[in-house]
Every structure is written in C-alpha cells, then in structure tokens.
Image (cartoon, helix red, strand yellow):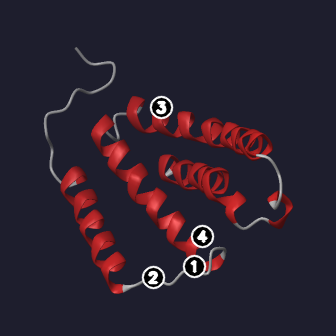
Amino acid sequence: MKTILLLVASNVFMTLAWYGHLKIKFFEGKSMFWIILFAWGVAFFEYCLMVPANRAGYLSGTFTGYQLKILQECITLGVFVVFAWVVLKEKLTWNYLVSFAFLVGAIYFATAFKTGARVPGGH
C-alpha cells in the first residue's frame, strides 16, 4: 500500500509539472524558459516520491519491475483523468473509459499470476 500511495502522490506532482502550465493563469505570457523551470521544480518533488515508491515496491519483493511500471502508468492515467476533468474541463468520453478498462485488465494480468520473477536479494 505504501508503494501505491507514493506512486499516486508522485503522479499528482508529475501531472502538475507536465500539464499545470496549460491552465495556471500565472503562466500566461511567460517565456518557455520560465515554464520549463517551473516544471523542473515541480518534477523534483515527483522524483522524491517516485524513487522511494519503486524501491519500496521492488526491494520488498512485492512487485517486479514490470508490475511497477504497469501500475505507475495506470495511476498516471487515473490522476490525469481527474486533472483533465477538474482543471482542463475536458469530458471523459466512452472511448477513454474503454481504454482505461483495458489498462485495468493490464494491471490484473501483470499482478495476478506468479511468473517466477527474481526476488530482490535472492540468488
């Protein structure tokens, strides 16, 4: 659970860094340099959460690298859906919902079966 909570928090920062400048009034008329500088500053906090999330999930043996990446991508999209709806004022249409359902299926298939993956610290 710690890994997933850290991944969600890190993705909030990532979404703000990548897309926040599209609607934050402060950035209207600002140069691309300042927008990139802002994004890098916010992304720092994303990394401060993402790296420990991946280490905790992987080194505990809870998740494989593949599982962490698939979880991270799905969490990213979940966070983005909320951001797009609330901040960008975009509608969530049926085709996006179907796409997300397939991603939920990806999480299931990535985590539901034992694959004999390497356990960290094992030989």
Q: Check disc 4: other Cα within 10 Å, few if <14, some if 14-19, many if 20+.
A: some
Q: Secondary structure at mark 1?
A: helix
Query: Mark number for residue 114?
Result: none
Q: Position of residue 77 (x, y in %)?
A: 45, 62
Q: Which residue is mark 2?
A: 92
Q: Which of label 3 and label 1 is nearer to you? A: 1
Q: Quadrant of the C terminus?
A: top left
Residue at the (79%, 47%) spot, across then down: 31
Q: Is residue 100 left or right of residue 39?
A: left
CA–CA distance in space, label 2 to label 1: 7 Å
Q: Is residue 13 above or below residue 95?
A: above
Q: Amino acid at mark 4?
A: Phe
Q: Position of residue 44 (x, y in %)?
A: 69, 36
Q: Are marks 3 and 1 in contact (CB under 8 Å)?
A: no
Q: Are marks 2 and 1 in contact (CB under 8 Å)?
A: yes
Query: Mark number for residue 85?
Result: 1
Q: Is residue 107 left or right of residue 18?
A: left
CA–CA distance in space, label 2 to label 4: 11 Å
Looking at marks 3 and 2 on the same chain, the residue that comes earlier in the sequence is marked by 3
Q: Secondary structure at mark 3?
A: helix
Residue at the (66%, 56%) spot, across then down: 16
Count up the numbered dots. Answer: 4
Query: Mark number for residue 83?
Result: 4
